[in-house]
Image (cartoon, rainbow, N blue to C red):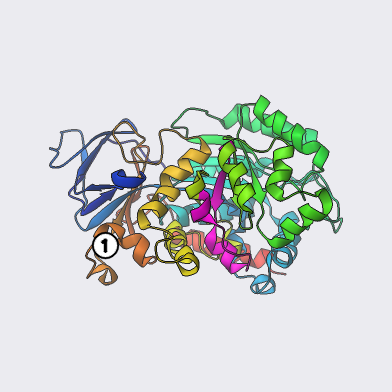
Amino acid sequence: MSIKNQALLIKNPDAVMSGLAGEGARLGRVDLRIRDGRIEAIAPHLEPRADERVIDARSCVVYPGWVNTHHHLFQNLLKGVPAGINADLQEWLAAVPYPRLARFTPELARIAARLGLAELLLSGVTTCADHHYLYHASGTTETGDLLFEEAAAFGMRFVLCRGGALQAAGDHPGFSSGILKPETFDQMFADIERLKARYHDASSTSMRRVVVAPTTPTFSLPPELLREVARAARGMGLRMHTHLSETMHYVDFCRERFGKLPVEFVADHEWLGPDVWFAHLVHLQASEIALLAASGSGCSHCPVSNARLGSGIAPAPQMAAAGVPMSLAVDGVASNESGSMTHEAHFAWLVHRAKQGAAATTIEQTIHWGSAGGARVLGLEAVGTLEVGQAADLVLYDIRDLRFNGFHDLAIAPVAAGEPARVRYNVVDSRVVVDDGVIPGLDLERLRHDAKEGVKRLLA
């Protein structure tokens, strides 16, 4: 696949949402001019120029591209595994991903990534941060490289959250059996240094980033290494990411082992700050929310996966109100069964209202979390909002389907109605990566075939 940067004019959409919070969330019926990877103009009735491709956006609503801040792309070949379908997180980890880690060849990892990236693009994602922990002492490190390769082929902004574990204690569900041995600190950071030198771009519109991301700060490495990892990451100028407080088991473990709540524990080990964000944060005390907010530490909110595993409902509205940087993420599809950010945003809007009342979340706020909020936690300052001068990352949802007829406010239709919501166009950095509903150059039939064969190889 080869996707070219183009000068574009998006004409006559039914509505445009900016990704901004508050009164600036809605831009109305305006055109958007895109040039050299940036938004050059936003105004009604813009006149086409000779060198522009004009995209007719009638019967479309325009959103900023979704920024998915926590994924596990290799899990795209592990959907609906029977042994884990009714399991909680600990049981699911032991039954689904970890028994198959050693069986993921680079070929299978590539097929899974291709499948996942295609689904993300077709749901309006323009940036993906993948928490990739497919590493062990005797395994290959080339899966990180192939993720960058596949993302580049699809034209997506990509952040590799380079995961892994540094201990084999009984606490860690992936290594406690002794079948696999974890990496050493030197192995992990040698690869991170290599990845940084080859791929990392710290610019505000970066297409490639590397993040230091041990799988969990409690189960994946001994506490004495936690500060060392944080200092090494900051010494390299890299952001940090990990799972935290996903279940009550996690909270109880921290209390019993360390005498601390999880956020208190990571605070003591230099794992808070505006360069850190955590996936899940389902079970938090008010004091922990205050610590996160005061330090500028962010959250990847994964409501579908948390519901699917019975983990609980994160206090996202309370975190947002306190000032915690909030983002949305689909998590791995082995604990979601969908890699659609439209689906995630729809559920995020609904689930807090079910628990806290109809005023708990708004669609504008949900879009903000999933776009500008995601760009913020990733440190992509020029991404996530539709404003003049910002990166040209946007998605056009087709609202011609019967289910969208009858809407009084079409701007909210994709989030309010949820899936299916067809993406007619997806634009990343001025490149049309979904063109009239199709990913250019992608052989879908071949991908379906490869995915089925991959599943056969992973059956147990």
Say which residue appears at 54% left-offset and 40% top-offset.
Answer: 159
Residue at disc 1, secondary structure: loop
Say which residue appears at 46% left-offset and 44% top-offset.
Answer: 373
Residue 62 shown in magenta: no
Give the vertical position of 459 relative to 300 (above or below): below
Q: Give coordinates of residue 96: x percent, y percent.
A: 69, 65
Instruction: Decide: few, some or many residues near mark 1? Use Cα within 10 Å; few <14, some 14-19, many ≥20.
Output: many
Examine the rendering and report whether any part of residue 392 can be seen. Answer: yes
Which of the pair 308/362 is nearer the observer? 362
Q: Quadrant of the N terminus?
A: top left
Compared across the picture, whether 245 is left or right of 342 comes to right
Q: Give coordinates of residue 291: x percent, y percent.
A: 62, 42
Examine the rendering and report whether any part of residue 155 can be seen. Answer: no
Residue under pointer 1: 399
Compared across the picture, whether 68 is left or right of 26 comes to right
Q: Quadrant of the C terminus?
A: bottom right
Residue 300 shown in magenta: yes
Q: Magenta segment, which residues? A: 295-319
Q: Amino acid at mark 1?
A: Ile
Hey, which quadrant is residue 149 in on the image? top right
Q: Give coordinates of residue 317: x percent, y percent.
A: 49, 55
Say which residue appears at 58% left-offset and 68% top-offset.
Answer: 308
Q: Residue lying furthest front in this view?
A: 287
Count of numbered tags: 1
Give the vertical position of 358 relative to 201 (above or below): below
Which of the pair 345/423 is nearer the observer? 345
Which of the pair 70/350 is nearer the observer? 350
